[in-house]
Image (cartoon, helix red, strand yellow):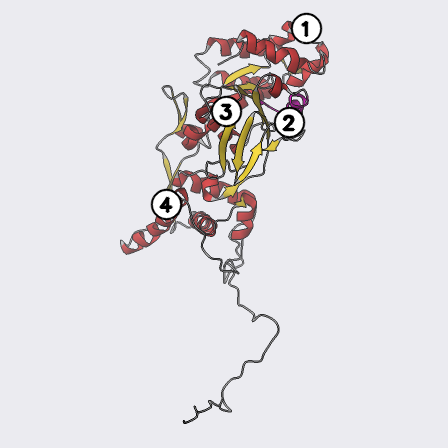
Amino acid sequence: MAKKPVKTRSKNSKVKKASNSAPSKKVVAGSSKVKRPKARVSTKDRKTLGELVSMADQVVLAARRKRDPHLDIPTRSLSNVKFNRRKRFIEMGKNTNRRLLFNLSQAKSYMQTMLVGSGCKQLIEQGKNTSIRGLYYMLKHTIDGTKENTFEEQSECDPVIEDVEVLLGSLREELHLYADKRGEMVGNLTLEDNGDLIDCARMGSGGYGIPSIVEPNVINFKKCTAKFVLHVEKGTVWQRFNEDKFWKKHNCILTHGAGQPPRGVRRLLNRMHNELNLPIFCLLDNDPWGYYIYSVIKQGSINLAYESQRMAIPKARFIGLRSKDYERCGLSPSVRIDLNENDRKRARQIMGYPWFEHKKAWQKEINLMLKNDFKLEVEALISKDISYVTEQYVPDRLADGDWLD
């Protein structure tokens, strides 16, 4: 049996030297250093991916038709927002701003928009999530052959992310982006968070930290015996309610959003209201900022007007603090905080909101605050007693049905 010939290397052939280290790779600025396998995507993710690809396809389509590529981005301003009286929340109008690739003043913002879309596509395909700051670092690089960066600061990237959201009609969370976690929850609710079972009645003094992404593919409600949700403005007040076990005594869920609630908290409140049929009561400060927070929870916000259906809670109720509480609760003059000119101006603006201007109770409320010429924080009730707000003020308001709608 003939032996197989042995292959020999010619003298002129190049020989690769063995090395214990991995071969070096040439990395193009802005390119992904590691190719990761595509993850299994959900039905919602497939829909979002389709919209992202369609956004990119517009460039090819325009080129084939020998037209300038452009994006028509819905205008995120007060002039393009209207109040739907039937639905009782803010909606975005039909005005758009055209962004052109071959317009010298718009070319960079057009490129940035497509770059954000590309970054979000990568995240969805890999089944990964990142923060908005993480995406900024993902996309920031120096453009080849120039000294120009794609983004100089995160403040330049964030508005473009919002542009992509509104352009696609998708929540940031559906683009696999999250913001810093703010807000906690405690109470008679069991949920599943990304496969882990969480009993919100057994979370100790810290409570359950409400994540940025609270969509059904991440958060599922398993068991709820609570009768309502009490949302308070600040973590300090929330801590008093949690320590006094208010949620246990009154069979409720207690939440806070560290001031104006972030999107995750608002979205979770919306889901608990609509999916669990829980009334939402808001305990906020007696000042223009407290009124505004209530307005955002109830009717939605200008920047997210296109998502009011999934954010706003038209039936949310304002349970305090009220302008009349200074006398009704016999508070000390020392707790009063004088209004400044900005407070007065903001209060009058809020009185003119379409969802407040025809409500006599709200007009009376804000007028009384202006007449008093001072504002009150919920913490002012501590001057009565450390637990006055949990043991008397809120229970009395609930028992009497004394709230603003």
**Mark positioned earlier in the residue sequence (4 or 2):** 4
Under circle 4, the secondary element is helix
**Mark positioned earlier in the residue sequence (3 or 4):** 4
Q: CA distance from mark 2 to mark 3?
A: 17 Å
- Which residue is identified by label 3? 297
Q: Which residues are magenta?
A: 231-243
**Mark positioned earlier in the residue sequence (4 or 1):** 4
Under circle 2, the secondary element is helix
Under circle 1, the secondary element is loop
Give, as a three-letter code, the residue at label 4.
Glu
Left or right? Give the position of 283 relative to 143. Answer: right
2 vs 3, front mark: 2
**Mark positioned earlier in the residue sequence (1 or 2):** 2
Name the residue nearer the viewer: 324 or 398. Answer: 398
Q: CA distance from mark 4 to mark 1?
A: 58 Å
How packed mark 4 is, by other alpha carbons closer than 10 Å (few <14, some 14-19, many 20 or more), is some
